[in-house]
Amino acid sequence: MQHLKEIVEEARRRGKKRLAVAYGQDAHTLAAVYEAYKEGLVEPILYGDPQIIEQVCKEEKIDINIFKIIPESNDVKCVKLAVAAAASGEADVLMKGLVSTDKYMRGILNKEAGLFPPKGTLSHIAVLEIPGYNKLLTIADVAVIPLPDFKQKQILIGNLTKIANMIGVKTPKIACIAPSEQLLPSVISSTEAAMLAKMGDRGQLGNVIVDGPLSLDVALYKEAAEIKKVKGSAVAGDADCLLFPNIESGNVFFKAATHMGGSELAAMVMGTNVPCVLTSRGDSSLTKLYSIALACLAAK
């Protein structure tokens, strides 16, 4: 796949999924869910204030009758109810509405809720369509794990691989990002990237090609790799996936690409028993639609 709209098309072919939306009562969320319904992706269940939902639907010219509405005015309780629906099998996909990310994540991580497996690792995966790049780019982690340790990086590579496979990349090329393509012994992101690359060479990370350390420019642009004389790398200048060393670097890239670079995206949380849509409250309806489609594609 080279475009996010192809994810929507493939999700449509897989059939409708039941979508539980926690505190789904803002215009962007309702518009995205309505569009996902019209695209044949979801049967939506909204947890929120019926009066507010009705008012927003009137303002946005949305047919309120397509929603199943579970009345609840408290955002935390909405999350609890939506998580319970996903955990019990009443919903196939969970989505964040107007509720803040910290409340949404606390609901997902609640051990008693049964959505997050014991000793699991939660991570955020995003797929970007970047103007000027020749394919979709899958990245992690920009929103959940602040500073992934070596074991978590291996899990993230597994998650990147799953999403890349899902969008048609059989053997993903994964770049482990560091400040420089030169191996710097005093920089942890550099040394761990080299170890991950060696594990990839030996087949310990699955059917992937892993290389690192690679600077961002070298990972994405062949000209940069050639100028810096990076030789023998199947990943340099042609990465399918980027593994960032920390949340700061990943988040800055993510926001710069979308807000300054004109990129569009789909994003979700992995590591839970059902796919969870995690977008910003300020994200566009189109971003949310693509994210719903990605989660529907990942749903069983």
Image (cartoon, grey):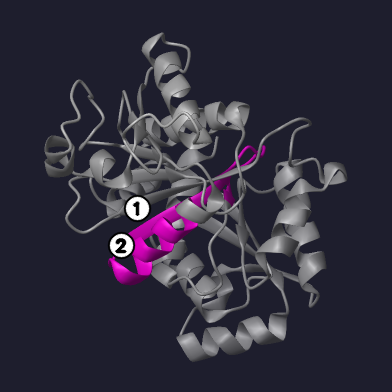
Percent position (x, y) of residue 181? Answer: 31, 35
For the question of whether residue 17 can be seen, the reply is no
**SS at circle 2:** loop
Q: Give the residue at mark 1.
A: 128
Q: Residue furthest front?
A: 186
- In the picture, the quarter occupied by the C terminus is top right
Check the image and report above or below for 153 versus 124: above
Q: Amino acid at mark 1?
A: Leu
Q: Quadrant of residue 56?
A: bottom right
Instruction: Determine if the magenta segment contains residue 40.
Output: no
Q: CA distance from mark 2 to mark 1?
A: 6 Å
Mark 2 touches mark 1? (CB < 8 Å): yes
- Which region of the structure is painted magenta? 250-276
Disc 2 crowd rating (10 Å Cα; few below 14, some 14-19, many 20+) is some
Taking the image as shown, residue 9 lies to the left or right of residue 124, namely left
Q: Give the residue at mark 2.
A: 263
Taking the image as shown, residue 209 lies to the left or right of residue 196, namely left
Taking the image as shown, residue 16 lies to the left or right of residue 2, namely right
Q: Residue furthest top?
A: 202
Taking the image as shown, residue 197 lies to the left or right of residue 113, namely left
Front residue of this view, candidates 2 and 60? 2
Disc 1 crowd rating (10 Å Cα; few below 14, some 14-19, many 20+) is many
Percent position (x, y) of residue 10? Answer: 34, 43
